[in-house]
Structure formats: structure tokens, C-alpha cells
Image: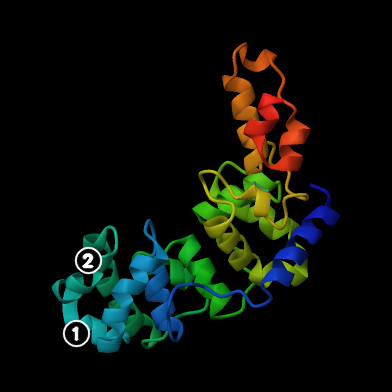
Amino acid sequence: MHPATRRAIFRRLSTANPEPKTELEHSGPFELLVAVMLSAHTTDKSVNAATRKLFPLANTPAAILALGEEGVKPYLKTVGLYNSKSRNLIGLCRMLIELHGGQVPADRESLEALPGVGRKTANVVRNIIFGETEIAVDTHIFRVANRTGLASGKTPRAVEDALTGNTPDEFKLNAHHWLILHGRYVCTALRPACPKCIIRDLCEYPDKTQPKAAAEARRLQRDSPGGSTRKIPLRAALRTGKPKKAAEE
Ligand code: SF4
């Protein structure tokens, strides 16, 4: 992708949403760390449902440690893999108290040493809490980056490295949020909403979802007697928005 195209994509995403935020509800570094750790392989919605009950009762390492593994499980039942996440949460709280004075560390090595915390979680925490220009690559960002041509790679790490290397500096801090939100609500895994996508003219994905009229006209063309050999006036269908009428003409 040409650097000017990349810059234009981020400029549009930035104009549409100048101050993007995580959808994980949190107040302070510890709550964010816990929420991100819990969000692995599950939705932000289910994490928020769990932490809305847990955090009012316990939102410090000491308070959660006091609940114990069995004590936190009932709160985490909406979250996938809650058994192992409950165990990791208790281990994480214990380590924060024993090694970091109950505070969330800023450096990657210490974060990744915490139970249940991998590179993606560490990146999110470092980005949101400590203002580091990290780009955490989850399933949404992996898809958006590869489809658009912003960064191609076969693994999340390859995409992360490519995005880190080629995203213009002024967009790096928020790139993670823009791409994740774009993947979650527009460039979805199934049938991306290309016709209403604000970067469709810049995106290099060859299999964009077609506008409804065009898709319908193509379907009629395909399904009509004689199959694909019978040509339906696609332009007329697009102009009128009435592919059936166009097909009869
Ligand atoms: S045009 Fe389609 S494939 Fe490209 S970013 Fe937008 S929604 Fe995704």
C-alpha cells in the first residue's frame, strides 16, 4: 500500500472518531488490566457484565485475593474459560502484591510475567494506561489489516510488527482503537459492510461486499435461464435500485 493511502485511511478514521476509547469498562490501571486479561477469547460485553458485578465489591489486588479462586468464579461465569481465568486472576493479584507493591507495572517484561497476561494484553495496558504507541493485534485488527492492505501477515505478531513499522507516528497511539472498532462494527468477519465503509475507496480488499442492488442484479443474472450467459443490465439496476424490473427489461 502506498504510504499516502495509509495516511489517508488513518486520517479518515481519526476524523470520524477523534478520541477513540476501549469498550472495556474500567476505572484505573488495575481494573483495565483485569478486564483485558478476562477479554481473551470472549466479548467485551461479557467481560463488562462480569466486572460490573465484581469491581464494586473488589477492585484492588488485595480485595480480589481475599475473595480467593472459588470466590471470584461466580462473578466470572459470563466470561469464557472462567475456570482458568479465575485461577489466573488470583495469581495475578498475588504477584502484583508480592512484586509490584499492588501496582500495575509499566514495563512489558513484568506485565507478560503475570498469569494470564500475554503480549496483546500487555500492549493494550501499555497503550491505554502508559501512553505507549503499542498496537495490540487481536482477531479484528488482524482481519482489517490484512484485508485493507494496511499490513499483511500470517500471524498477529507479523501484523503487529508491520503496523508498528508503517503506521504514521501521529496515528500510532490510537491506531489500535480505530482498527478494532472498524473491525467490530464495519469490517466484520462475515459480510463486511463495504458499501457504507468510510475507507472503501482506499481499501485494497478485492472481495468487497457489493451494494444491495448490484448484488441482487448479479444474483438474478446468475439464477436466470441460461445462467451467467444472460446479461442483466447491471447499470440500470444500480441506477434504479430495482434489479427485478431491470431484469425484465
Ligand atoms: S471496504 Fe470492506 S473490506 Fe475494506 S475496510 Fe471497508 S468494510 Fe473492510
- Mark 2 lies on a secondary structure that is loop
Give amino acid for label 2.
Lys
For label 1, count other residues whose C-alpha is less than 10 Å away and answer few (under 14), some (14-19) or many (20+).
some
Quadrant of the frame with the C terminus: top right
For residue 57, say whether it is visible. Answer: yes
The residue at 29%/63% (across/down) is 79
Percent coordinates x, y for residue 218 in the rendering = 64, 29
In the picture provided, is 68 more to the left or to the right than 28? left
Which residue sits at x=62%, y=11%?
A: 226
Can you say whether 205 is above or below 24 in the image? above
Dot 2 alpha-carbon crowd within 10 angstroms: few under 14, some 14 to 19, many 20 or more: some
* Residue for badge 2: 77
In front here: 103 or 141? 141
Q: Which mark is residue 66?
A: 1
Residue 16 spot, x, y in % from top left: 70, 69
Quadrant of residue 104 in the image?
A: bottom left
Q: CA distance from mark 1 to mark 2?
A: 19 Å
Asked if the residue at label 1 sits under 8 Å from ligand 1, the reply is: no
Which residue corresponds to the image point at 32% horizontal and 86% vertical from the top-left?
A: 59
Q: Is residue 113 left or right of residue 202?
A: left
Q: Residue furthest top?
A: 226
Circle on res. 33: none
